[in-house]
Amino acid sequence: MSRIIRTEPNAILSKAVEYHGFIFTQGVVARDLSLDAEGQTRDILAQLDEILEEHGTDNTRILQAQIWLKSISDRDALNRVWSAWLPANMAPARACVQAEMADPRVLVEIMLTTTK
């Protein structure tokens, strides 16, 4: 049986789950919710870098991204930061939708599926 590694699990979720060389992250939100969409995106991507590094991978190995925005009008701000963060020609499959957030201060939430 293959081992499942759960990073920082709690009663409702794990920060990440690793299985067969795949890493599935939680939906990551900014630590500082007073930031604008661009600032929240920068913070989220920094957190994702930390999670991926902890699992021995990086943003060159992203397979899929799911992105939720409080307002789809923040898509351009998100994309400026996202595009600068991604290595050239390494964009994953991606969905980006507007959603009602659990906390109204959350403007961006990002979840990744990567591999090692």
Image (spheres, rainbow, N blue to C red):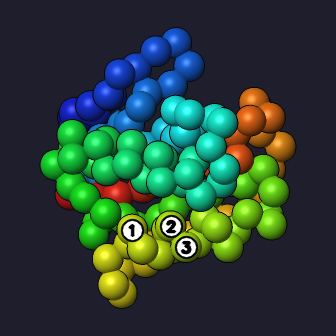
Disc assigned to residue 81: 2
Location of residue 112 in the rendering, given as x and y in whole percent from the top left corner: 46, 54
Question: Of the residues shown, which amino acid type is indicated by label 1?
Answer: Trp
Residue at image coords 57%, 48%: 40
Location of residue 26 in the rendering, given as x and y in whole percent from the top left corner: 49, 39
Real-space Cα separation, disc 3 to disc 1, in angstroms: 9 Å
Q: Is residue 47 above or below residue 42?
A: above
User: Pointer 3: what residue?
Assistant: 80
Q: Is residue 109 above or below residue 76?
A: above
Q: Residue furthest bottom?
A: 89
Residue at image coords 51%, 25%: 13
Image quadrant holding the C terminus, namely: bottom left
Pointer 1 and pointer 2: residues touching (CB < 8 Å)?
A: yes
Rate crowding at label 2 as few (under 14), some (14 to 19) or many (20 or more) other CA atoms within 10 Å: some
Image quadrant holding the N terminus, namely: top left
Disc assigned to residue 20: none
Real-space Cα separation, disc 3 to disc 2, in angstroms: 4 Å
Seen from the viewer's position, the closer of residues 5 and 90 is: 90
Is residue 108 in view?
A: yes
User: Pointer 1: what residue?
Assistant: 85
Seen from the viewer's position, the closer of residues 61 and 78 is: 78
Secondary structure of the residue carrying tag 2 is helix
Pointer 3 and pointer 1: residues touching (CB < 8 Å)?
A: no
Q: Residue furthest top?
A: 11
Pointer 3 and pointer 2: residues touching (CB < 8 Å)?
A: yes
Location of residue 83 in the rendering, given as x and y in whole percent from the top left corner: 47, 75
Location of residue 96 in the rendering, given as x and y in whole percent from the top left corner: 67, 65
The image quarter containing residue 92 is bottom left
Secondary structure of the residue carrying tag 1 is helix
